[in-house]
Image (cartoon, rainbow, N blue to C red):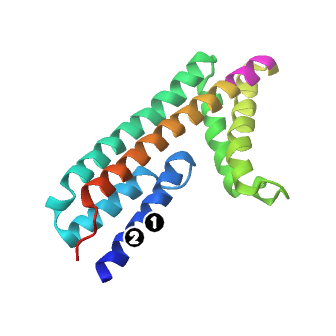
């Protein structure tokens, strides 16, 4: 019975990992891989070998996708390193800074608006052209969002593989 509780607790952790794969600043697929690893420690790694291998491969893919999607979005829009740095600073400020204090949206609003404003400021400082800065900022944000959505799909797939290979929970 205790193993069943642990199993469902780890599945809940994996659901947080799915959310984290899509939302920046929350651990994503690494959290899922960690939960699978813990289940392997408890039940033996032979019971999770496929799921753990899939999670590790998806974790490596997600890191590459994150960088590639942001880079391609930025490149497609003609963004500079200044815009990319601005987007990262904007993300941190959006999550931890002033934007969560807004009466509507809170941190979720900050996650979306922060990188956009940060990239806009960074690009404007570099280019001194508001139209080009806005285009580059949107490109960075679109690339990031597309990358996060792909990571979300990979995270869901990793959890499904875990559930598929470990269901039903054995005592």
Where, by quadrant of the figure, is residue 145 drawn?
top right
Residue occupying the point 33% across, 57% down: 163
Q: Which mark is residue 122?
A: none
Mark 1 lies on residue: 12
Asked if residue 39 is positioned above or below residue 113 in the image, the reply reads below
**Horizontal arrangement in the rendering, residue 21 relative to residue 114 (left or right):** left
The local secondary structure at tag 1 comes to helix
Name the residue furthest right.
103
Q: Position of residue 66 (x, y in %)?
A: 47, 36
Q: Compute the Cα span from label 1 to label 2.
A: 6 Å
Bounds of the magenta span?
131-136
Q: Position of residue 95 (x, y in %)?
A: 67, 54
Asked if residue 10 is positioned above or below residue 147 in the image, the reply reads below
Mark 2 lies on residue: 8
**Horizontal arrangement in the rendering, residue 124 relative to residue 2 (left or right):** right
Whether the magenta-drawn stretch holds residue 134 is answered as: yes
Name the residue furthest left.
46
Asked if residue 156 is positioned above or below residue 101 in the image, the reply reads above
Where, by quadrant of the figure, is residue 125 drawn?
top right
Labelled pair 1, 2 in contact (Cβ < 8 Å):
yes
Is disc 1 surrounded by few (<14), some (14 to 19) or many (20+) residues within 10 Å?
some
Q: Position of residue 102 (x, y in %)?
A: 83, 56
Q: Position of residue 7 (x, y in %)?
A: 34, 70
Q: Nearer the viewer, residue 63 or 37?
A: 37
Q: Quadrant of the C terminus?
A: bottom left
Residue occupying the point 42% across, 59% down: 14
């Amino acid at each position: 019975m205790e193993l069943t509780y642990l199993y469902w607790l780890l599945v809940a952790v994996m659901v947080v990992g799915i959310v984290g794969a899509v939302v920046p600043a929350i651990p994503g697929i690494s959290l899922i891989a960690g939960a699978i690893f813990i289940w392997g420690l408890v039940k033996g790694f032979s019971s999770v070998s496929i799921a753990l291998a899939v999670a590790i491969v998806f974790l490596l893919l997600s890191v590459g996708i994150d960088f590639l999607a942001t880079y391609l979005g930025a490149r497609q829009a003609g963004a500079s390193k200044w815009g990319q740095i601005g987007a990262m600073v904007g993300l941190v400020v959006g999550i931890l800074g002033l934007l969560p204090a807004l009466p509507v949206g809170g941190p979720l609003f900050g996650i979306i608006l922060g990188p956009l404003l940060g990239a806009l400021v960074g690009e404007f400082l570099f280019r001194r052209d508001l139209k080009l800065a806005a285009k580059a900022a949107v490109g960075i944000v679109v690339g990031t969002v597309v990358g996060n959505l792909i990571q979300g799909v990979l995270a869901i797939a990793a959890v499904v593989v875990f559930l598929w290979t470990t269901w039903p929970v054995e005592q």
